[in-house]
Amino acid sequence: MTPRAYLPLVLLVATVAAQERGAVDEQRSAWRFRRAVTLPADAEGRLLAVPLPPEVQARSQPGLRDVRLVDETGREAPFIVHEDTARRAERRWAGRLDESQQERLRESAWTVDFGAVVPFDRLELDIPGREFSKRLTLDTSVDGQTWAPAGTDFWVFDRLWQSEGVHDTTLHVGALHARFVRIAADDTRSRPVSLRGVVAVQTEDFAGTAWSEELALELLGSADGRTRYRVPVADGHPVRRMSFDAGDPAFARRVTVFERREDEERPIGSGLVYRLRLPDEAADLDARDIGVRRQSGGALVVEIEDGDNPPLASPRVRLSGPQTLLVASTTARGLTLYYGNPVTRPSVYDLEQLRTALSVVAAYPLAVLGPEGENPRFRQPAPLAFVTARGAALDARAWRYARPLRITGTEDLYTLVVPPADLAALRRDLGDLRLVDEADRQVPYVLERDADVVRVPLAASGARPRQDRPKTTAHRLSLPHAGEGADVVRLASLRLRFAEPFYRRDAVVLVPRASAPQGADRMASGVISLPARESTAEPPWAEIPLGGLAASAFILEIDDGDNAPLTLLQAEAVVPVPRLTFKASPGAYRVLLGNPEAGPPSYELGLLAREVLAYSAVPLDLGEVRPPDANPAHQRGVADAIREAPPTLVLWGALGFAVVVLLALTRRILKRAA
């Protein structure tokens, strides 16, 4: 047949292969990325390792929970995730006491059988008892017939050393191979000891492997003697160490590495880096490495303290970390690595039970990963697809307040921080908080109390100190929109900013109460202080812990002594606030607040709280937070009217009702008497 005659067959095979690949891609449609895996030639019937480049880890869930190895039929290949770090591995073999001999006042001897010839570099002896010291000799044999001396100067002991008991019964014997070991103890100078067991241990050190890449830092800006740079890598890049360099022949700067996520920065590493190039020496003097410990997987920002020096010339950084391997057990061909699924759970393979044994393997045959490509069948998965996003309907007319909320985008998990203005409209147990859609169907949520804090500006005005105390300045501080129910807002601390560049004063926080001995209850106290600062610097904040004080307004008294009063510029309260996490699709929603009769909600979603909170939910921004609007559908009941009525009106109403009842009873009694 001519080559042209084989063309239909080749096309048929290619079509079938494409259909099979399309079927596997469809099964993995929730995984965005894929790479072909080429197995090594010597992997047949053996464990193999797939090295993962840093960009795969950056696009995957933490801990590589979404990574899958899939063969051409769609079946998963089991694997464990192994970081090839420098480590010390041990293999242990327990021996059997085969023979025991004792010659009184001379020697005790034991023969140990490990069942096979094993390699070991130390023996761990199980010797009970206290207050002994013994010199041992050691012989080894591979067959139990021919013996070779392995040493005559081993010691085991149990002694009190500097008030601490020391019990050492380990023999470091070097590299040996044997099945039988004979141990003899000198009993001529001390009483015999007993031996209950022996374990042979082989120790092996592995250097580990690492990846590295060098990048130029991208300038973000300079201010106040500090220069900030962006590290141009994807969020979640698994860097463990940074080595800094620059074009300057000599530099010494303090460097801090931050992880930025959702406008929040956390330091993850810092240190002094320096380098001095010596033209007449073979090596430079330098220390340019900083270890980092990633937390949230955000963007990497580097801050260099330049002081009065100009910024470094052409700063760059070498990133490095331990090589991550997927140690897999498979003989399948046509393997594909899938990753990039933000909502899947981690896989569980029985290979995980062998992790300890696999960690002592020095090296595996290495597979090769192909270039990254997008799954052509990829569809963005909905988080927790098996969880319904709607609960039972409710009668929204029973709630006094409502805050509108609009969600755009796609179906996802969202988080919403409950602002202090809403806390003032809720019960203390937050049991009357509801989230509903346009049809008044409840949206189940998971509630985290005190999950976040917000800073609320306080209104400040002059006040009179208790009993007109001399040398004391008083300020009245109040929450904005402090109306009915505002006392349920708990305050973690009070932050104050003064104009003066240096001060140290005692301060007291009081809550007004007419029945208190001095017209107020003392709730907190502290020292506000500020060391001397540059006059051009922005005034820093002084802070007084309030410990969860529930008050809408309070008095701050500052003991001035013989100093001039401080000039209060700003005051704010740090308020712990709860956070809701819920599943929702685009649309209009309302947060309902203020229903004293409502029972606490009970959602099945609460059973999945750990999974829900582990997901990287989308935060919702309420914009400028104002007090919640009155619910236009709210219908006031008798109970509402009584609660909202002034206390005097309630009192006179109760007295009037009592008078009417007494008149009716009197009339009935008089009729009976007539």
Image: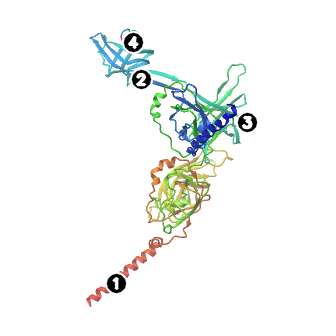
Q: CA distance from mark 4 to mark 1?
A: 112 Å
The verdict on residue 301 being magenta is no
| Percent position of residue 262, x then y | 61, 48
The residue lying toward the viewer, choosing from 332 and 388, is: 332
Secondary structure at badge 2 equals strand
| Percent position of residue 234, x then y | 64, 40
Which residue type carries mark 2? Arg
Q: Which residues are magenta?
A: 139-144
Which residue type carries mark 4? Thr
Q: Which residue is labeled 3 in the image?
A: 310
Q: Residues within 10 Å of mark 1 (few under 14, many from 20)?
A: few
The reply to whether discs 3 and 1 touch (Cβ–Cβ < 8 Å) is no
Q: Give the position of the C terminus as an image quadrant.
A: bottom left
N-term mark: 3 or 4 = 4
The verdict on residue 142 being magenta is yes
In the image, residue 425 above or below residue 363: below
Q: Give the position of the N terminus as an image quadrant.
A: top right
Q: CA distance from mark 2 to mark 4?
A: 17 Å
| Percent position of residue 410, x then y | 60, 54
Which residue type carries mark 3? Pro
Q: Quadrant of residue 299?
A: top right
Q: Quadrant of residue 243?
A: top right
In the image, residue 674 above or below residue 108: below
Secondary structure at badge 4 equals strand
Q: Quadrant of residue 648?
A: bottom left
Q: Which residue is labeled 2 in the image?
A: 92
Relative placement, left or right, of 155 versus 88 is left
N-term mark: 2 or 1 = 2
Q: Which residue is labeled 4 in the image?
A: 140
Mark number for residue 664? Answer: 1
Relative placement, left or right, of 193 versus 493 is left
